[in-house]
Amino acid sequence: MKKILLTLVACAAFIFVCGTSSFAQIKIGHINTQEILQLMPERDSAAKKFDKFNAEITKNYESMTVAVNNLIDTYTKQKDSLSSFIQKAKEAEIIDMQGKIQNFKEVAQQELDKKQTELMTPIVDKLKKAIKEVAEANKFTYVIDVAGGSLVYFPEDESLNLLPLVKAKLGLK
C-alpha cells in the first residue's frame, strides 16, 4: 500500500513538473499595431495618395449634385408654364439623374475601399513581417495586438511590449 501511494505521489509530482515546465516555454508579447502604423512614413505617403483620390471623387460627386439641384430649381421655377408632357419629361430626367448620382456614390465608396486596401496592404505586410521576425528572434510563442480591442486584460509586467523592438527593426523613432 505504501509503495502504491509513493508511486502515485511520484507520478503526480512528475506530471506537475512536466506540466509546469511546458508552461514555462510559452512566451507572450504584445504590440499596438496602430501606434506603429502611425509612425511609418509609408503610411503618410499612402494617406496623401488616398486623400487626393478621395478629393477627386468628392469633386465629381459635388459637381453632379450641383447639376441636379440646378435642374430641380429650374424645373420648379418653370413648372407652371410647362405642358404636362414636358413636366413629366423633366421629372423623369431629374429622377434619372438622381439615380445616376446614387449609383456613382455606391461605386465611389467601393473604389475608395479598394484604393485604401491597395495602398495599405504593402505597409501592413511590412509591419507583419517585422513583427514575425522580432517574435521569432526573441522566441515569442504568441504576440497579441492590443489595438484590436478584443483584449480585455493582460498583465503588462509579464508581457513584453514589442513596440520598441519592431520600431527598431523598421528603423522608426
Image (tube, rainbow, N blue to C red):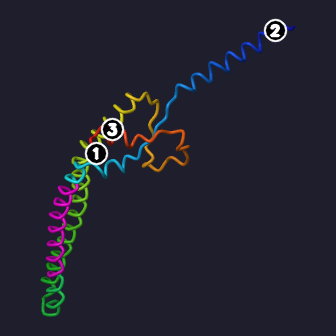
* Quarter containing the N terminus: top right
For the point 59% across and 22% down, the residue is: 21
**SS of the residue at dot 2?**
helix
For the point 41% across and 40% down, the residue is: 162
Q: As shown in the figure, which amino acid type bears the numbered disc 1?
A: Leu
Q: Nearer the viewer, residue 80 or 10?
A: 10
User: 48 left or right of 149?
Assistant: left
User: 12 left or right of 147?
Assistant: right
Q: Which mark is residue 4?
A: 2
Q: Which residue is mark 3?
A: 128
Answer whether residue 52 is magenta in the image.
yes
Whole-angstrom CA distance, mark 1 to mark 3, is: 15 Å
Task: Please tell me whether residue 79 is drawn above or below residue 131 in the rendered image.
Answer: below
**SS of the residue at dot 3?**
helix
Residue 143 location (% of width, % of height): 44, 37
Query: Residue reaching furthest right?
Result: 1
Report the magenta residues as a range: 47-71
**SS of the residue at dot 1?**
loop
Q: As shown in the figure, which amino acid type bears the numbered disc 2?
A: Ile
Q: Which mark is residue 172?
A: 1
- Counting residues from the start of the chain, the first of labels 1 and 2 encountered is 2
The mark lying in front, picked from 1 and 3, is 1
For the point 57% across and 26% down, the residue is: 23
